[in-house]
Image (cartoon, rainbow, N blue to C red):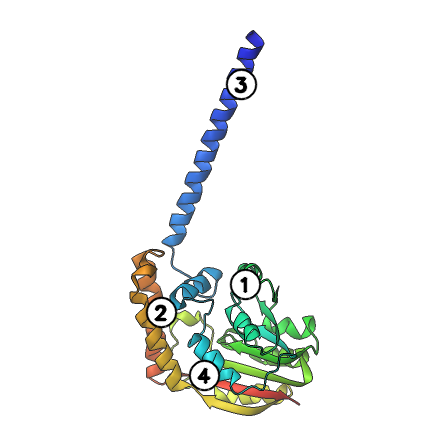
Amino acid sequence: MATLLAWILTRTKSLFWRSLWNCCQGAKICANVERKRNTPVKMDEHDGKQFLATVRSADYAHPGEAESIDLVFAMVPAQPSWRVLDVGCGRGGTADYVSCHGWGCVTGVDIDREAVEYARSKYPNLEFAVCDMQSVGDQYPEQFDLIYLFNVFYAACDKNAAMMSFRRAAKQTGLLGIFDYVMYKTDRGLPSVFLDQKPATSDELTEWMNGSSWKLIEHINLDDKYIEWYRNFLTRFEDPALGKIYPPQVIADVRSKYAQLLDSLEQGILGGAFLLFSAR
């Protein structure tokens, strides 16, 4: 009997301490979640991409969402048999859209491991990998008929090296499509959303193209479309559903960043463009 009572007391103590530990862990998790909710969103990290996906109601971080993808692929003779590389794929929404529309067998790469893991889980029929722009040529030599980037190239640390890397990843008849910001007034400051990353000028793109065996075959000015897309984007911050997920100060902080971006577009400091290159 004494042995039984001792076992019961020991078991009770064990359950008590385990329950207390679980409560402490739960409180710690809740505190971390609350802290994260109130922490300013970093737009180049997965939390930033998740925020943009929430505002855009899809796994996109680029302006125009599906409309801009349709615009780009209207100019690209993509085929279902093509191997296609999405550089800076983020959460995988663009890669999935391209695949579902029969524009090729898509592989997505991104430096954000958390975003890649999300994409693998959400779109298991596609291939995703962690890889930076300067390394795709080494990781996927001469494998792709088409390589594309949606508002990613501006963030390359070494844009010239990135262009050469894309060429190594492309087949001999490969195409490269860059949908991105263009820098017009280099003496002006950039919005904080760029985090010291600088979009290329037209002259820089020409220089890097010549040094990396690409030939420009199409250059579409999208300045007005970028303004239209970002004006529309900013109106979505008024959606009450967003306030159920993020605190007001976080929403206001992100909106302020993109309001600065829109202002730079409207002042002509920045613009947008789609450039299509062929390998040479």
Q: Residue at x 54, y 70 (%)?
A: 96
Q: Earlier in the sequence, mark 3 or mark 1?
A: 3
Q: Earlier in the sequence, mark 4 or mark 3?
A: 3
Mark 4 residue type: Val
Residue 85 x/y as whole percent:
61, 75
Which class describes the residues within 10 Å of circle 1: few (<14), some (14-19), or many (20+)? some
Mark 3 residue type: Thr
Which class describes the residues within 10 Å of circle 3: few (<14), some (14-19), or many (20+)? few
Q: Residue 63 has which mark?
A: none
Q: Nearer the viewer, mark 2 or mark 3?
A: 3
Mark 1 residue type: Asp
Q: Earlier in the sequence, mark 1 or mark 4?
A: 1
Q: Judge left or right: residue 277 versus residue 227.
A: right
Q: Judge left or right: residue 99 versus residue 249.
A: right
- Look at the image and tell me in which quarter the N terminus lies: top right
Q: Nearer the viewer, mark 1 or mark 4?
A: 1
Q: Which residue is mark 2?
A: 257
Gap between marks 2 and 3 measured at Cα: 57 Å
Gap between marks 1 and 2 measured at Cα: 21 Å
Q: Which residue is mark 3?
A: 10
Helix, strand or loop at label 1? It is loop
Gap between marks 3 and 1 measured at Cα: 47 Å
Q: Residue 182 has which mark?
A: 4
Which class describes the residues within 10 Å of circle 2: few (<14), some (14-19), or many (20+)? some
